[in-house]
Image: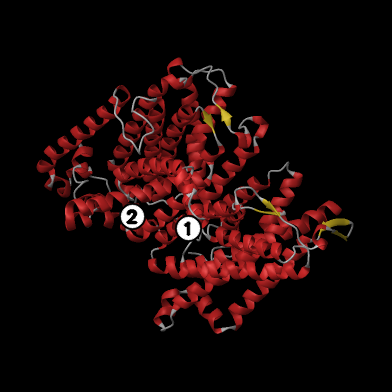
C-alpha cells in the first residue's frame, strides 16, 4: 500500500518524502507509483514495522478518544469538567472539528502551496447551506448534506477556476474578495434566508433524535471524531496519491511540471475543490454541534483563524494542523475565561486591556511563532525531542513550503 | 440628473478613500512583494488618533480638523515605520512569512483597539460645514465628500511629484521595476522599504481620519472593511501601479455606488464580478505589467 509506505517517513526527516516527490515529478508521474521509487524502497522494510506501529498508535488514540465520553477523567485548567459532561464534550468536539478544518486548509497551503484567504467561504457554505436547506426543504439530514456538498462542489469549481488564474499573493487577494462577497451575502440576509447578523437557528424537525439536545452531546462528539478521522484519511490519501505528488511538485517548481507535460492548473483546481469540500463537510457538523449558523463562520476572520492554526502547529505537516487546531481552540477558550476572571480585573489598565483580549494574545503569539519558530509547535517539539536530525525535518519543511507558496 | 451627480460625487469621495489605502498597499507590494494585511490597522489607528485629537481640541473647529488630519497621518506613518523596522525587515525576502506577520499584527491590533476604545462605533463630529450640503447642478452634495476628494487628489499629486522628481522617488520606481538591479548598483533599497511603508502608513492614517468623517463614525473594524476593497482595487488596477490604483479606486467606487442605487444594493457583488472579469481577461490588472 503506497500510502503507508510513504507515510513511514513522516516522523523522520521529510527529505525522503521530498525525494519521492521529485522522482515522481521527474518521470512525470506517468510510469510509476511513488511507492515503486527507490527512495521509498530504501525505507521499505524498516518502515513496514514502523508504519504498523504508527497506525497502531493512531488507532489506539482514536479508540481512546472514542471512549472518553464514557470515562470520568478530569483535566483541570484544560476542560471545564470531567470528560463525560456535555460542556467538556462540546469543547473537545469543537477542538476536533477545528483540527479537521485546519487539515482541510493544510490541503491548500501545505500540499499545493496555495495561500488562500477565502477558505471560510466553503466552511461557511457548509454551515449555511445545510442550515438553509434544512430550514426550507422538508428533507432528512443525509440528503440535505448531499445537496449541500453538491452546491459546494460547484461553488469551489467556479471560484477556483477564476482565482487560480493568478498565483501567489494575487491569488490570496482574489480568494479573499470572493469570500468577502459570500460574507456580505450572508450579512445582507437575502429573502430572510440567512438571518443576517443574527445568524440562523438549526431546524431540528428533520434531524434524527440522537443528534438533538444537550443530553446527546456525546453523539455529536463521536460524529466530530468520525469527521476528523475521515478528513485525515482523505487528506492523507490525496497527499500521497499521484495527484498529491504532482501538486507538491507544482508547489516546488510549476514551470518544470508544465514542461513535463502535466497541467498544473487542473491539479491545483482539484486540490482546491477537495479542500473546499472537506471544509464544508466540517462546517456541516459544526452547524449540528453549535445548533446554529453565525456570520463569523463565513468571515475572513475565520480563514485567518485557520491560517493561524496551521502556522502555529507547523506548516506542511498534517499533525501540525491537528495540533494547531486543538491548541488554538483550547487556548482561545481558556483565554476568554481568563479575560473575565477577577485576577485580570484587578490589574492596571495597560496590563488589563491587552490581557483581556484573547485575540491580542493569540495574534502576538502568532507573530512570535512566525518570527522565531518557523516549524510551529510540531517543529519545536521535534527539535526538543530528537535534536539536530529532526531540526532539518519540520522546521525546514515549513520554511520550504512557505517559500514555495510565494 | 441630480441623482446621477450625487452618486458621481459620492462615488468619487469613496474612491478617494479607497485610493488613500490602495496607493500605499500597491507601492508596498510593488517594491517589496508584501501584501500588507496590517494596512487596515494603520488606517484605524490614524482614525482613532484623529478622533482623540479632535475631541480634545474642540471637534467643531477647522483648526482641530486640520490638526486631527496631521496627527492621524503622523500616527499612521509612525506605526507603519515601526512595523517595517521591527517586524518586516527581519524576514527580508520571505514574502509569505511577511504576509503572515502582518496578518498576526492586524489580529492583535484590532483586538487591542477593541480593548481600548470598545467594540461599538464611536460617532464623531466635524466642523459644522461638513454636515451641510452644497448645491451642485441641482444635486445636494454632503460637503465631507469634497474634502476626501481634494485630500486624495493632493496625495496623488504629492506622490507623483515625489516619485518623479526626487532621488528617493526614483529609487522606489526603479526598485518596483527591478529590485535586484537597484541593489546591484550599490543602493540600499532597505531605506526605500521603510520610506514606502511610512508613506503608505501616512496615506492610510489620513484616509482613516477622512473615512471617519465620511462614514460619521470610528470603529476598530473601520480599517478592515476598507482594506478588502483596497485589495480589490489594487488587483484591478495592477499591483505596483500608482496610476492603476487611482483609476481603479474611482472605477470601483463609482461602480459600487451606481450598482447600489440602480441594481438593488448589489454594489459589493458587482465589484467582485468586475474583479473576476478583470482576472479572466487581464490577469495582471488594468495597468499592471505583464508578469
Position of the N terminus of chain A by quadrant: top left
Q: Quick check: A89 left or right of B46?
A: left
Query: In this rendering, does residue B250 appear at all?
Result: no
Q: Is residue A288 above or below residue A44?
A: above
Label 2 is found on which chain of the structure? A
Tell which of A26 and A345 is nearer to you.
Answer: A345
Residue lying at the far top in this picture: please name it: A209
Position of the C terminus of chain A by quadrant: bottom left
Residue positioned 41% across, 36% down in the render: A278
Q: Which mark is residue A269?
A: none
Q: Quick check: A274 left or right of A373?
A: right
Q: In this view, does A268 lie above or below B23?
A: above
Tell which of B237 and A122 is nearer to you.
Answer: A122
Residue A239 falls in which quadrant of the image? Answer: top left
Residue positioned 27% across, 46% down in the render: A29
Residue positioned 62% across, 51% down in the render: B274
Q: Is residue A244 above or below residue A190?
A: below
Q: Do labels 2 and 1 share a chain?
A: no
- Crowding around mark 2 (Cα neighbors within 10 Å: few <14, some 14 to 19, many 20+) is many
Q: Quick check: B75 left or right of B62?
A: left
Q: Which mark is residue A401?
A: 2
For label 1, the SS is helix
Q: In x, y percent, where is residue B101?
A: 43, 59
How far apart are labels 2 and 1 at the CA level? Answer: 22 Å
- Crowding around mark 1 (Cα neighbors within 10 Å: few <14, some 14 to 19, many 20+) is many
Mark 1 sits on what residue?
A: B105
Q: In x, y percent, where is residue B62?
A: 77, 68
Label 1 is found on which chain of the structure? B
Tell which of A109 and B212 is nearer to you.
Answer: B212
Amino acid at each position: 500500500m503506497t500510502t503507508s509506505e510513504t507515510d513511514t517517513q513522516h516522523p523522520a526527516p521529510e527529505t525522503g518524502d521530498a525525494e519521492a516527490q521529485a522522482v515522481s515529478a521527474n518521470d512525470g508521474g506517468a510510469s510509476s507509483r511513488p511507492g515503486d521509487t527507490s527512495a521509498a524502497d530504501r525505507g521499505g522494510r524498516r518502515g513496514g514495522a514502523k508504519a504498523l506501529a504508527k497506525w497502531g498508535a493512531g488507532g489506539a488514540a482514536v479508540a481512546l478518544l472514542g471512549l472518553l465520553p464514557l470515562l470520568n477523567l478530569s483535566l483541570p485548567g484544560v476542560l471545564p469538567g470531567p470528560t463525560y459532561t456535555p460542556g467538556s464534550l462540546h469543547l473537545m468536539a469543537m477542538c476536533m472539528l477545528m483540527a479537521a478544518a485546519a487539515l482541510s486548509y493544510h490541503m491548500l497551503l501545505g500540499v499545493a502551496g496555495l495561500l488562500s484567504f477565502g477558505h471560510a467561504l466553503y466552511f461557511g457554505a457548509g454551515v449555511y447551506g445545510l442550515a438553509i436547506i434544512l430550514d426550507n426543504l422538508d428533507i432528512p439530514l443525509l440528503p440535505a448534506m448531499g445537496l449541500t456538498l453538491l452546491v459546494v462542489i460547484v461553488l469551489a469549481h467556479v471560484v477556483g477556476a477564476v482565482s487560480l488564474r493568478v498565483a501567489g499573493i494575487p491569488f490570496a487577494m482574489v480568494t479573499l474578495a470572493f469570500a468577502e462577497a459570500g460574507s456580505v451575502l450572508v450579512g445582507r440576509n437575502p429573502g430572510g434566508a440567512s438571518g443576517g447578523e443574527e445568524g440562523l437557528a438549526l431546524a431540528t424537525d428533520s434531524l434524527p433524535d440522537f443528534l438533538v439536545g444537550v443530553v446527546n452531546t456525546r453523539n455529536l462528539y463521536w460524529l466530530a471524531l468520525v469527521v476528523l478521522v475521515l478528513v485525515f484519511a482523505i487528506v492523507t490519501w490525496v497527499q500521497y496519491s499521484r495527484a498529491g505528488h504532482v501538486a507538491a511538485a507544482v508547489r516546488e517548481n510549476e514551470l518544470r511540471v508544465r514542461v513535463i507535460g502535466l497541467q498544473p492548473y487542473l491539479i491545483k483546481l482539484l486540490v482546491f475543490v477537495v479542500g473546499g469540500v472537506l471544509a464544508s463537510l466540517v462546517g456541516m457538523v459544526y452547524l449540528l454541534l453549535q445548533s446554529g449558523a453565525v456570520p463569523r463562520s463565513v468571515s475572513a476572520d475565520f480563514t485567518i483563524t485557520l491560517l493561524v492554526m496551521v502556522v502555529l502547529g507547523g506548516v506542511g505537516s498534517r499533525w501540525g494542523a491537528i495540533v494547531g487546531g486543538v491548541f488554538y481552540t483550547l487556548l482561545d477558550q481558556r483565554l476568554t475565561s481568563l479575560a473575565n476572571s477577577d485576577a485580570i480585573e484587578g490589574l492596571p489598565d495597560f496590563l488589563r486591556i491587552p490581557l483581556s483580549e484573547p485575540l491580542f494574545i493569540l495574534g502576538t503569539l502568532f507573530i512570535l511563532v512566525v518570527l522565531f519558530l518557523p516549524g510551529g509547535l510540531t517543529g519545536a517539539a521535534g527539535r526538543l525531542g530528537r535534536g539536530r536530525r529532526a531540526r532539518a525535518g519540520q522546521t525546514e519543511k515549513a520554511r520550504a513550503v512557505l517559500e514555495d507558496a510565494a | 440628473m441630480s441623482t446621477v451627480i450625487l452618486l458621481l460625487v459620492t462615488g468619487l469621495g469613496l474612491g478617494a478613500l479607497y485610493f488613500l489605502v490602495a496607493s500605499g498597499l500597491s507601492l508596498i507590494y510593488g517594491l517589496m512583494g508584501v501584501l500588507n494585511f496590517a494596512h487596515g490597522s494603520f488606517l484605524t489607528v490614524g482614525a482613532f488618533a484623529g478622533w482623540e485629537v479632535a475631541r480634545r481640541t474642540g471637534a467643531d473647529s477647522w483648526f482641530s480638523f486640520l490638526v486631527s488630519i496631521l496627527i492621524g497621518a503622523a500616527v499612521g506613518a509612525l506605526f507603519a515605520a515601526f512595523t517595517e523596522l521591527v517586524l518586516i525587515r527581519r524576514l527580508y525576502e520571505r514574502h509569505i512569512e511577511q504576509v503572515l506577520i502582518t496578518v498576526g499584527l492586524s489580529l492583535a491590533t484590532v483586538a487591542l483597539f477593541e480593548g481600548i476604545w470598545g467594540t461599538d462605533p464611536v460617532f464623531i463630529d466635524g466642523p459644522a460645514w461638513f454636515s451641510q450640503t452644497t448645491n451642485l447642478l441641482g444635486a445636494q452634495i454632503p460637503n465631507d465628500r469634497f474634502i476626501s476628494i481634494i485630500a486624495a487628489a493632493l496625495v496623488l499629486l504629492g506622490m507623483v511629484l515625489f516619485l518623479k522628481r526626487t532621488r528617493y522617488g526614483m529609487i522606489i520606481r526603479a526598485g518596483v521595476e527591478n529590485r535586484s538591479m537597484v541593489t546591484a548598483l550599490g543602493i540600499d533599497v532597505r531605506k526605500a522599504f521603510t520610506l514606502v511603508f511610512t508613506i503608505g502608513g501616512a496615506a492610510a492614517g489620513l484616509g482613516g481620519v477622512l473615512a471617519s468623517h465620511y462614514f460619521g463614525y470610528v470603529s476598530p473594524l473601520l480599517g478592515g472593511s476598507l482594506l478588502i476593497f483596497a485589495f480589490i482595487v489594487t488587483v484591478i488596477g495592477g499591483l505596483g501601479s500608482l496610476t492603476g490604483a487611482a483609476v481603479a479606486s474611482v472605477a470601483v467606487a463609482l461602480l459600487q455606488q451606481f450598482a447600489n442605487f440602480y441594481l438593488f444594493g448589489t454594489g459589493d457583488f458587482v465589484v467582485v464580478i468586475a474583479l473576476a472579469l478583470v482576472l479572466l481577461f487581464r490577469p495582471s490588472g488594468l495597468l499592471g505589467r505583464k508578469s
